[in-house]
């Protein structure tokens, strides 16, 4: 699967792929990452990419021309490229989107900077528009990386153990039950005793109860959507 980051600041993005799971996925040629800088497409003699807002307002807005030309060039090389814009006013990105997007062959992430991107670019080129949460970042690069990471771990072969994908939070309405590692006793704190006894059916029941507690505490609105345990139990 290929990702193209359309960004003025590729160096911010590059570092994320230099270690751990995504680095290995690139080495195994499961993922390919490329960068496209709108500044390289600017027809302004100083390679300007932004200007003051038409109609007034604080700050600078990214001009249409460099982004139009960058995206035209991308589409001419691969007409199947799926173009995703990052903006705080987009659709909230969810785990289901990560799974769905992992089936695409090529995704381009377009990052805004300053006050954002001229709306005409979004109107003409967006296949999808996502927000990663209700807060304002200085640019779309982190948001692109968040989505790229969540999509990548759903690409076949990227995670060593694909079971990890099925037992996680957001696969059901319940959040995942707490996990514990070794040693069993750490500074006098132990996992629930049932975890240590090895009866898998009892562990499963206890984990379901702990998942319900966690969800009630952190996401009470999720449980309110379900009347019975059957409607969310696997
Ligand atoms: N003036 C805009 C914010 C611009 S922030 C507004 O009020 O809506 C600059 C850029 O950062 C945006 O173009 C977008 O690409 C990115 N960005 C900021 N917050 C984001 C978020 N929550 N999700 C996705 N992208 C975000």
Image (cartoon, rainbow, N blue to C red):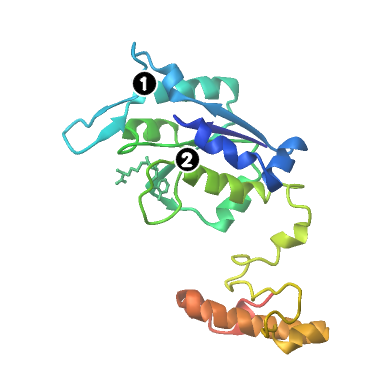
- Give the image location of residue 219, x and y in percent: 48, 74
Q: Quadrant of the N terminus?
A: top right
Disc 1: CA contacts within 10 A as few (<14), some (14-19) or many (>=20) = some
- Give the image location of residue 93, x and y in percent: 49, 53
Q: Nearer the viewer, residue 140 or 77?
A: 140
Q: Residue 195 occupies which quadrant of the picture?
A: bottom right
Q: Residue 190 occupies which quadrant of the picture?
A: bottom right
**Element on which disc 2 rests:** helix
Residue shown at 44%/37% (left/top)? 111
Q: Is mark 2 within 8 Å of ligand 1?
A: no
Q: Which residue is mark 1?
A: 65
- Give the image location of residue 101, x and y in percent: 60, 46
- In which quadrant of this rendering is ligand 1 seen? top left
Q: Which residue sits furthest top? A: 45
Q: Which residue sits furthest right? A: 198
Disc 2: CA contacts within 10 A as few (<14), some (14-19) or many (>=20) = many
Q: In this rendering, would 189 be left or right of 58?
A: right
Residue shown at 62%/82% (left/top)? 210
Q: In this rendering, would 64 be left or right of 102?
A: left
- Give the image location of residue 22, x and y in percent: 68, 44
Q: Nearer the viewer, residue 68 or 217?
A: 217
Q: Is residue 29 visible?
A: no
* In the rendered image, the vertical position of residue 216 relative to residue 113, given as above or below: below
* In the rendered image, the vertical position of residue 143 relative to residue 233, given as above or below: above
Q: Is residue 67 visible?
A: yes
Q: Quadrant of the C terminus?
A: bottom right
Q: Which residue is mark 2?
A: 141
Disc ID at residue 1: none
Quick one: label 1 or label 2, which is nearer the N terminus? 1
Which is closer to the viewer, label 1 or label 2? 2
**Element on which disc 1 rests:** helix
């Amino acid at each position: 699967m290929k990702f193209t980051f359309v960004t003025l600041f590729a160096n911010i993005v590059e570092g994320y792929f230099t270690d751990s799971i995504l680095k290995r996925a690139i080495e195994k040629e499961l993922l390919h990452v490329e960068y496209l800088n709108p500044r390289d497409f600017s027809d302004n003699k100083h390679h300007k990419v932004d200007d003051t807002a038409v109609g007034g307002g604080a700050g600078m807005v990214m001009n249409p021309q460099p982004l139009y030309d960058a995206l035209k060039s991308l589409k001419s090389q691969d007409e199947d490229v799926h173009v995703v814009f990052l903006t705080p006013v987009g659709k909230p990105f969810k785990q289901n989107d990560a799974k769905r997007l992992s089936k695409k062959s090529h995704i381009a992430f377009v990052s805004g900077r300053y006050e954002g991107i001229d709306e005409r670019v979004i109107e003409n080129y967006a296949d999808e528009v996502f927000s990663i949460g209700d807060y304002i970042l200085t640019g779309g690069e982190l948001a692109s990386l968040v989505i790229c990471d969540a999509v990548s771990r759903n690409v076949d072969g990227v995670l060593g153990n694909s079971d990890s994908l099925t037992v996680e939070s957001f696969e059901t309405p319940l959040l995942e039950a707490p996990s514990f590692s070794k040693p069993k006793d750490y500074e006098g704190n132990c996992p629930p005793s049932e975890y240590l006894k090895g009866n898998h059916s009892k562990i499963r029941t206890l984990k379901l109860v702990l998942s319900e507690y966690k969800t009630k505490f952190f996401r009470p609105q999720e449980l309110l959507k379900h009347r019975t345990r059957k409607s969310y139990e696997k």
